[in-house]
Image (cartoon, grey):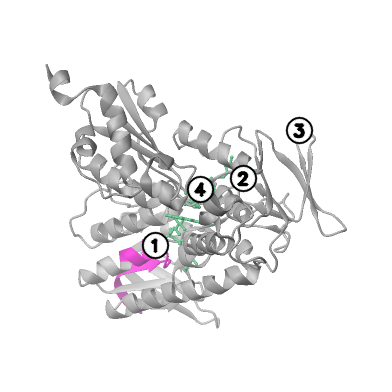
Amino acid sequence: MMQYDLIVVGSGPAGRRAAIQAAKLGKKVVVIEQGKRVGGVSVHTGTIPSKTMRETALNLSGWRERGFYGRAYRVKEQISAEDLRRRLIITLDHEVEVLEHQFARNRVQHIRGRASFVDVNTMQIVKEDGEVVQITGTSILLAVGTKPFRPDYIPFDGKTVLDSDELLDIEELPRSMAVIGAGVIGIEYATIFSALDTAVTIIDPKSTMLDFIDKEIVEDFTYQLRDRNMKLHLGQKADKVERLPDGKCQITLDSGRVIICEMVLFAAGRMGATESLNLAAAGLQADTRGRLSVNPETFQTSVPNIYAAGDVIGFPSLASTSMEQGRIAARVAVGAIAKEPPKFFPYGIYAVPEISTCGLTEEEVKTRGIPYECGIARFRETSRGHIMGLDSGLLKLIFSLKTRRLLGIHIVGEGATELVHIGQAVLNLKGTVEYFVENTFNYPTLAEAYKIAGLDAWNRMGDLKSTAH
Ligand SMILES: Cc1cc2nc3c(=O)[nH]c(=O)nc-3n(C[C@H](O)[C@H](O)[C@H](O)COP(=O)(O)OP(=O)(O)OC[C@H]3O[C@@H](n4cnc5c(N)ncnc54)[C@H](O)[C@@H]3O)c2cc1C
Ligand SMILES: NC(=O)c1ccc[n+]([C@@H]2O[C@H](COP(=O)([O-])OP(=O)(O)OC[C@H]3O[C@@H](n4cnc5c(N)ncnc54)[C@H](O)[C@@H]3O)[C@@H](O)[C@H]2O)c1
């Protein structure tokens, strides 16, 4: 039986980083992946496909130029599902190739098949051709990720009623679409399809959406969605989803309202992919959503030599955080020094427009009783904004009045997911409002919004000398 220092189950962001980290430390590592190609949900059905689809939609629709040329402006008149798929295939091929090369040059072995526990050190792998092999590992990392939540009352057919994995294979772009679930996945796809001129309706039983984002940012974002005619039915539950004889779908809400559309995307959360792992053989148990609990510093499960990282351990369920978790878990597993990740990490929502945030929201600052001041900048106040024809975009900074330190960065608008890292660095390095006031920023850039927001807060906070005495 083959013996390894570390067995990694799953080749998504957590598994990939963990495997390479352990290999760099000279350990013998194997990655088991049941999918046809390595990369996980992130590469094949999640992050990369959705972001590629977004980029293609924005480019072909001419979305970024509409501020200048009007809402009727298009780069390509008739955009098809095939247009979206073509770019997707090229991007995914590159991603897989880079990953396979990384595994090869770091001598990470890869076995294709489905893994399950035999005991705490042994895993059985069922390969595609039915061959069964067993391997042992000193440590095992479960980086199995998640699957879409598919409740029985939704008549999924993979064509008109779909989950977010199936959405990537549609044959035609719908003229109308209802998105059930106003979480990150629902909102991202709803706004991407709206940019492609699909008439989109969003339905969620909660009366608010994106609750972890600063309220002012969500209000600005929601205003923009309504302004382009997207329909939001929040606080309303989809009681029934039916397919009509003409091929359309009918959704009946608990308010009695009926929505007819060509396509339904059901995006109401995901379930940990733990059911086929035979967890009981290792003395482990998942929660009702298939997730595993771990020590947040070491990523160890209740069984000391078994680790879990990535989406299978729940919040925040991001590719970015999964990678860090995997790296730390691998270091702990092979006995190297590992440091807990910083408390404040960025969150990027690739909707149209983008939202990105890091640190405390204004609501959290209030709840904690921290005296604070906010600084706001609108992208239309920046010269780069004028050049780009932006009429929206907002950057909000929150500072402590006591320490003058940056507490939160909240952005909605073009480039938000890139811009946030400037604020993230200042925040995690414990910088104050003075950083933005005293430093020179490239001009003309959207980053200048930091300067404007910093000055806006500073004007109300007074300068350092006057508050120090
Ligand atoms: C539509 C969508 C958009 C997203 N967009 C973003 C984004 O923009 N930014 C961001 O940071 N995050 C995003 N995410 C989240 C991101 O994709 C996940 O956080 C990330 O993929 C989780 O990585 P992971 O390592 O936990 O495993 P995953 O990527 O989920 O991969 C797990 C792998 O394990 C394999 N596996 C499972 N069970 C077994 C088994 N028994 N044997 C062998 N192999 C097994 C699976 O086949 C899969 O390949 C998005 C997710 C979705 C669904
Ligand atoms: N840009 C990103 O970083 C990104 C993008 C997409 C997904 N993700 C990750 O993927 C994970 C899953 O995303 P998600 O959007 O599926 O889940 P989610 O948990 O974020 O949102 C689910 C939404 O569906 C609603 N809902 C729950 N049950 C429902 C039901 N039965 N009917 C209708 N609505 C219901 C909830 O009220 C919630 O608003 C998230 O945790 C997120 O972190 C990240």
Of residues 264 and 119, the one nearer the viewer is 264
Question: In the rendering, at what x and y percent does residue 342 appear?
Answer: 27, 45
Asked whether 305 falls inside the magenta stretch, the response is no
Residue located 51% across and 58% down the image: 273
- Disc on res. 255: 3
- Left-right relation of 364 to 126: left
Q: How crowded is mark 1: few (under 14 residues within 10 Å), some or many (20 or more)?
A: many
Give the mark toward the camera: 4 or 2.
4
- Amino acid type assigned to the residue bearing label 4 in the image: Pro
Label 1 SS? helix
Which residues are drawn in magenta?
1-18
Q: Which of the two discs, 1 and 4, labels the residue nearer the N terminus?
A: 1
Question: In the rendering, at what x and y percent does residue 138 appear?
Answer: 29, 66
The residue wearing badge 4 is 353
Q: Residues within 10 Å of mark 4 (few under 14, many from 20)?
A: many
The residue wearing badge 2 is 181
